[in-house]
Amino acid sequence: MAQRRRTSGVGAARLGELLALIDEAWERRAWHGTNLRGALRGMSAEQAAWRPAPGRHNAWEEAVHAAYWKYAVRRRLTGEKRGSFALEGSNWFARPEGRADEAAWKRDLKLLAEEHRGLREVVAALDPARLDRRTPGSKHTAAFMLRGIASHDLYHAGQIQLLKRLHASARPR
């Protein structure tokens, strides 16, 4: 019995570490610099819609892409069926649709925050014993996907930071 408690304590601590990693990548202070929410903070729709070149993604698309993958990981953890994301399609979503509209940009930022919140709730309720089990319909374990979604947030935070600098240097002075 004592062995079992110790194992579950280790599992709970491991789950806590994964939650901390997800939080740092999204919005908590971390040593590595800007997280995803921080990279998007204060951006206007015009800044978010700017493309460094034709056919390249903009910060707006990066944000919606991150929302989609938070949804996808949550869905894989819960066994939820595909096709329940708020937007039609998958992975990359062309943004903006038409003119760069502040209200549309705010809606997509809200979608990203909601998808993060939903993912975090599922992860916080996860049985630590599931961390090393493959998730339904995937060849990956839950722990692997949780480390991945945190890395994904940070990867796109870096891309968005770079897009902001490129946008600033591309504007006429």
Image: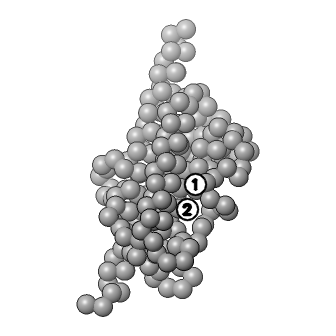
Instruction: Say if mark 1 contacts mark 2, CB within 8 Å.
Output: yes
Q: Farthest top residue?
A: 1
Q: Which mark is residue 151?
A: none
Q: Residue at x 53, y 30 (%)?
A: 125
Where is residue 58 drawn, in percent x and y?
48, 74
- In this view, the residue in front, 116 or 128, is 116
Q: How crowded is the residue under tag 2: few (<14 C-alpha within 10 Å), some, or many (20+)? A: many
Tell me the residue that label 2 is attached to: 65
Check disc 2 and give the amino acid type: His
Where is residue 68 drawn, in percent x and y?
58, 56
Tell me the residue that label 1 is attached to: 69
Q: Could you tell whether 171 is left or right of 85 in the image?
A: left
Q: Quadrant of residue 45?
A: bottom left
Q: Could you tell me which secondary element the residue under label 2 belongs to? A: helix
- In this view, the residue in front, 132 or 160, is 160
Q: Farthest bottom residue?
A: 172
Q: Residue at x 45, y 71 (%)?
A: 101
Q: Is residue 152 visible?
A: no
Examine the rendered structure and indicate whether residue 132 appears above or below residue 39.
Answer: above
Where is residue 74 drawn, in percent x and y?
59, 44
Q: Residue at x 45, y 45 (%)?
A: 22
